[in-house]
Structure formats: C-alpha cells, structure tokens
C-alpha cells in the first residue's frame, strides 16, 4: 500500500472516530429490577434547577439517571429546588407528576408549574 493510501486510510479512520464520538451522550442502561425502575426527569419549568428524589439530589438538565432507582408503581418522594444543587434555602413547590415505566426501564417524572 502506498504512503498516500495509508495517510488517506488514517484520515478516514480519524474522521470516523470523530463522527462516532461527537454524537449526543447516551444514558447508561437501567439495571433496576424487580419492583424498581430508574428515574428519568423532564423539567417543564425554567425556575426549577434540581430535584431530590427519595433523598438523592439530581442536578442537571432533563434526562435519564440510571444511578437512581424508584418504586415502579408507588409515588416516590420528590422535592424541587430553584438552586442547582438542592440547596435548602431554594426549596419550592413545583408540581410533580409521575408517569409509568418506559420500555428501557426508566420511570418519568415531569416537573411543572
């Protein structure tokens, strides 16, 4: 193989790697089982920046949290906060609505006004 072909192959491989890793982050697979599901959050208000689900603070944007498990059928305890790290002084009372479990094992919670 000539040097030009080797360089072209290397460039194509590099471009392929960039294309694969440049996509959006994918949530880890939910490993919950039995009577539990992982949590997925949809923030539908801009004044809630973090929530506490069964004592665990979830920070960040809407999305899936494979490390936090909740009961598949009950009503988990949720507190909402205006601060980005579940600060007690920013506690508020946004409306919380729990959905059912999706096919990937995540139970959605919607945070609304």
Image: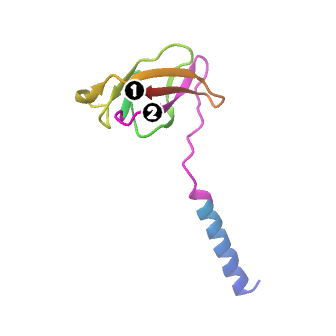
Query: Image check: 95 left or right of 36?
Result: left
| Tag 2 residue | 44
Give the residues drawn in magenta, as a range.
Answer: 20-49
- Tag 1 secondary structure: loop
Give the mark count.
Answer: 2
Sequence-first tag of 2 and 1: 2
Residue 83 image offset from top left, x and y in percent? 29, 35
Task: Give the alpha-carbon distance from disc 2 to disc 1, as whole Å.
Answer: 8 Å
Kindly identify the residue that appears in the image at 25 percent across and 27 percent down: 88
Could you tell me residue 15's position as x and y percent?
62, 68
Tell me the residue at 31%/35% (across/down).
85
Q: Is residue 76 magenta?
A: no
- Image quarter where the C terminus lies is top left
Q: Residue furthest top?
A: 74
Extreme residue toward the right, this view: 1
Give the residue displayed 53% in from the left and 27% down from the top.
108
Residue bearing the label numbered 1: 113
Q: Are marks 2 and 1 in contact (CB under 8 Å)?
A: yes
Dot 1 alpha-carbon crowd within 10 angstroms: few under 14, some 14 to 19, many 20 or more? few
């Amino acid at each position: 193989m000539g040097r030009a072909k080797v360089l072209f192959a290397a460039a194509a491989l590099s471009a392929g790697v960039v294309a694969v890793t440049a996509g959006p982050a994918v949530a880890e697979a939910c490993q919950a089982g039995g009577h539990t599901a992982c949590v997925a959050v949809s923030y539908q208000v801009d004044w809630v920046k973090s929530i506490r689900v069964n004592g665990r603070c979830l920070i960040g944007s809407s999305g899936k949290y494979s490390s936090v498990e909740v009961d598949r059928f009950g009503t988990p305890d949720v507190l909402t906060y205006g601060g980005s790290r579940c600060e007690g002084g920013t506690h508020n009372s946004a409306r919380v609505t729990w959905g059912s479990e999706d096919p990937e094992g995540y139970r959605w919670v919607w945070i609304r006004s």
